Image: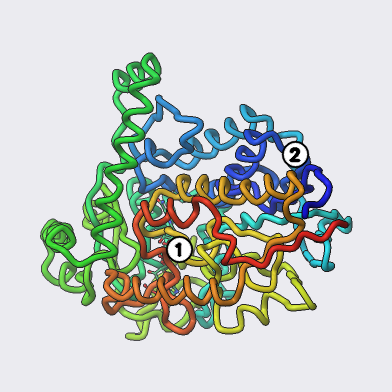
Amino acid sequence: MSTSKREPRVVIVGAGMSGIAMGVAMKRAGFENFVILEKGSDVGGTWYWNHYPGLSCDVPSQLYQYSFHLKPDWERVFATQDEILAYHREVVDRFGLKDHLRLDTEVTQAQWSGEEWSVEANGQTKRADFVVMATGVLHHPNVPDIPGLEDFEGTTLHSARWDDEVGFAGKRVAVIGTGSTGVQIVSAMQPVAEQVTLFTRSPQWVLWGPTEMRQPELVSALLRRVPLLNRLVFESLLKASWLFTDVVTRPSWRRRLLQAFARRRMDSIRDEDLRARLTPAYEPLCKRQVVSGPFLRAIQEPNVEVVTEAIDHVGANGVVTADAKAREFDLIALATGFEAHNYMRPMNLVGRDGLTIEEAWRDGPRAYRMMAIPGFPNLFSILGPNSPVGSLPLHHAAELSASYIVRWLERFARGEIRSVEVTEEASDEFNAQAAKALGPTVWNTGCNSWYQRADGTIDLWPFNRATMKRMLGEPDDTHFHLGITAR
Ligand code: NAP
């Protein structure tokens, strides 16, 4: 039995890396009936929202790109925020996504009627056969609950909502937080600010990497001239990325070697007291690994102080630590990370039989293979729960997810299905597999990190790339309730 053939109406929420991957996948499959709703004023997602001083990617540029649009001439081996943002804008232009894009459009509600989705944004309702949530992982700034923070009379900025008009040259700056962000901010500010004080609650291992190295002109020219070579470099790097997945997911001599390298790196801190205070008590790679060329040098410059004493409160002029020491500042930079498990919220998402996402995720976000949630028919997420933020190239994961979704859209267009909803059993089975595979990962070796959900379980992809390709290859019909009712 089949229903009538027609192109599905699709709403994609978010024009970051995942939403763009989805839009391109639809275009390439010949689908035109879709919109991409984006609450920001530009595309780029995290690369649009984040523009703090020193922001660059700590994944090599040649890997941090789509397979369908390989850029040969990255300026830096680890690209800066503005270059990555420009790259994503270029993809949007090149693949004709502009006409599908609605910027400054925030989705506040999406509801399944039993037959279709009603998506509300900017006071208007859009009806769709499918909704693709491409809303990102690290989006909601985590503003720390430090007493008196609002009393500070200087400027306070969170890294993820930076104000480029606020300079830091010649200023006394407090940086709170020592994750990838805090490390980049300190490294960028140290040469220009009068004084940088880094407040570190838990120290981080810092792996050295050539994070400031330019891509040689000759390499760019060669890759531009010989597209085949450009493709070969990309494919080789993608293949080589197994090594990174391997060290984080399975104990081995390779993991121990990299950890020894991270430990050894601490020797570059000359002052014994500082080295002792900055040496973590947990294993390297357990938290999201920080990679930086300049950081350990920057913190040893005379205008930088690293404070490991706990912050007691913030006053009108600065920060007071638990030992009652007060330090004055002009600017406080909050590099305190994100509410990482807030996928899709605060949107009001209502699935089958009035089930809300809050009810479905009472015990924390769970999905089938990152993408499908029981109770939410014809809704898929890209880089949702268990996405491989700590272990695999994200553009690659987004592309695989997008083509998986397109397979369902094609079946809809052929009239084979009208609705698809993952079963509780398939979702439970995937989550049990993931929980088992997370056991031997390095993320589970006794540190606190944003990888952990409220109940302490880890929200990451613990499998290798081959498993991801298999899981996001041909959909398995036995894992879904398929509806074939004609509308
Ligand atoms: P993060 O890794 O979550 O680090 C937040 C920091 O703030 C931690 O040092 C944390 O200390 C500290 N902190 C939080 N609340 C605090 C409080 N109340 N008082 C004192 N300190 C507090 O956040 P992030 O550095 O923004 O990085 C988040 C993720 O974004 C990264 O892991 C990475 O995935 C991504 N990122 C990527 C790049 C890139 O180059 N690709 C760059 C930046 C960020 P504790 O450790 O004690 O909690």
Crowd tier of the residue under label 1, counting other residues whose Cα lies within 10 Å: few below 14, some 14–19, many 20 or above: many
Q: Is residue 165 above or below residue 121?
A: above
Q: Residues within 10 Å of mark 2 (few under 14, many from 20)?
A: some
Q: Residue at x 36, y 70 (%)?
A: 199
Mark 1 vs ligand 1: CB below 8 Å:
yes
Quadrant location of the N terminus?
Answer: bottom right
* Image coordinates for residue 385, horizontal then vertical, percent: 52, 66
Does residue 311 appear to the left or right of 8 in the view shown? left
Quadrant of residue 6 in the image?
A: top right
* Residue farthest toward the front in the current orientation of the protein: 1
The residue located at (59%, 61%) in the rendering is 477
Q: Quadrant of the C terminus?
A: bottom right
The correct choice, above or below, for 425 with respect to 48 in the image is: below
Mark 2 within 8 Å of ligand 1, using the beta carbon: no
Q: Earlier in the sequence, mark 1 or mark 2?
A: 2
Q: Nearer the viewer, residue 471 or 307?
A: 471
The label on residue 335 is 1
* Three-letter code for the amino acid on which mark 1 is drawn: Ala
Q: Position of residue 39 (x, y in %)?
A: 71, 53
| Residue 165 appears in the figure | no
Compare residues 126 and 279 and report the one nearer the observer: 126
* Tag 1 secondary structure: loop
Q: Is residue 27 left or right of residue 248?
A: right
Question: How far, Cα to Cα, is label 1 from label 2?
Answer: 34 Å
Q: Residue at x 36, y 48 (%)?
A: 58
Q: Amino acid at mark 2?
A: His
Q: Nearest the camera: 120 or 155?
A: 120
Q: Which residue is mark 2?
A: 100
Who is closer to the viewer here, 218 or 317?
Answer: 218
